[in-house]
Image (cartoon, grey):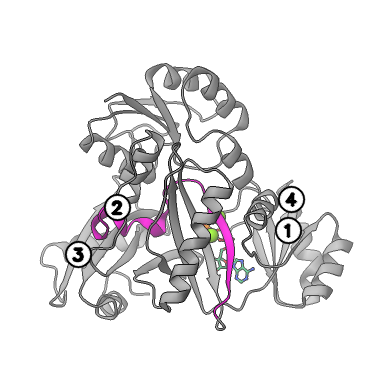
Amino acid sequence: GGTIGILGGGQLGRMLALAGRAMGYRFATLDPTPDSPCGQVADEQIVAAYDDAEAARKLAERSDVITYEFENVDAGVAAMLMSESYVPQGSELLYTTQHRLREKRAIEAAGVKVAPYREIGSAEQLREAVREFGTPCVLKTATGGYDGKGQWVIRSEDEIGEAYETLSRAKTELVLEQFIHFEKEISVIAARSPRGEVQAFPAAENIHVDNILHLSIVPARASEDVLKRAERMAVRIAESMQAIGLIAVEMFLTRDGELYVNELAPRPHNSGHYTMEACRTSQFEQHLRAVCNLPLGPVELLTPVVMANVLGEHVAPLLEWMGDEAGLPDGVAAKVHLYGKHEAKAKRKMGHVNLLTDDVEKAIDWVERSPIWKG
Ligand code: ATP
Ligand code: MG
Ligand code: MG
């Protein structure tokens, strides 16, 4: 029993609360939006800004354990919550993953490869580094980026000035990365508990459209050897960083079988939503087991699965399709999840569909032809 406090009221918090209620926990959530996706299913919602110290103290009072569902938690708020309540994930992992340079150094310290990178402090340094890496290469802000925002693919030396000037406005350090001509993107989500137990979910193959996740395909279409190496890398990172709870590891796989870690997220991850029906334990249950110091659950895959994200523009055709599930092939079952967001704005993550299938190609083909995801 007990109450779990969630900092953040989005869909990740909502799915944590839905999983945790089945386990007998109560939930309190702090988010500036009234009736947030998580607030709708929590026992109590505190509506305030994330950095509102008074509201954070209230969350701490209500909660036996506190977790977060996004990584840009203010360091001062994290410190306060840790002194007023129990935050098993600590603040170290947040501090590291909030900043691409710190994150890359921590990955390298775990003995895992990242794309070659350079810290950039001036336009002149950028020019030198671009010459060294060649084009294309990718300039990124060290903090605050998501869905490809805060980055610039430099395709020729002519763009250096504009790229530097544009990203410098973010008032954070910049990082230049060598462009990895990857064959696939994959991700592995690992969980670690305070007693030191570690489990990695099966690797997902991820397909992005406009820098937003479109499909996660499991099993990923790569060799057994690659998948085992990817899973071991995630375990190594979780252990080396002494993570508590989930840590999602995004990777690039090259044609010659090399794996490079792109970035980390110390929380449930969009590419792990497939676990909800396709694994013996979902990523949400696993996170709660970890932060509550329960034994971790088994992670094995029960069925091949394709997760398709539902963005704002997909909601209306999805709702229409749900009435008769027209065209769904034999051997494929569609599990629809919607997050209770009120405004279906274009590109906004509104839900996802887990297609449990006897053959991933069949499910991918159905998504590609479906009127829900056209255009
Ligand atoms: P997210 O929404 O996943 O947090 P983000 O804004 O933090 O995204 P990244 O994950 O770093 O950004 O990059 C977004 C996408 O851009 C990657 O998934 C990949 O497709 C491409 N990309 C990023 N870095 C590189 C690189 N060094 N080489 C090639 N492609 C890259
Ligand atoms: Mg990111
Ligand atoms: Mg990413």
Lower sequence index among marks 1 and 4: 4
Front position among marks 2 and 1: 2
The residue pinned by badge 3 equals: 334
Q: CA distance from mark 1 to mark 4?
A: 14 Å
Is 286 drawn above or below residue 363 in the view shown?
above
Crowding at label 1, few (<14), some or many (≥20) Cα neighbours within 10 Å?
Answer: many
Is 79 drawn above or below residue 336 in the view shown?
above
Front position among marks 4 and 3: 3
Which numbered marker is on residue 298? 2
Which numbered marker is on residue 148? none
Lower sequence index among marks 2 and 1: 1
Q: CA distance from mark 4 to mark 2?
A: 46 Å
Q: Position of residue 94 (x, y in %)?
A: 57, 40
The residue pinned by badge 4 equals: 169
Give the structural element (helix, strand or loop) at label 1: strand
Indicate the amino acid at tag 4. Answer: Arg
Image mark count: 4
Q: Position of residue 160 (x, y in %)?
A: 79, 68
Question: Quarter of the image holding residue 225?
Answer: bottom left
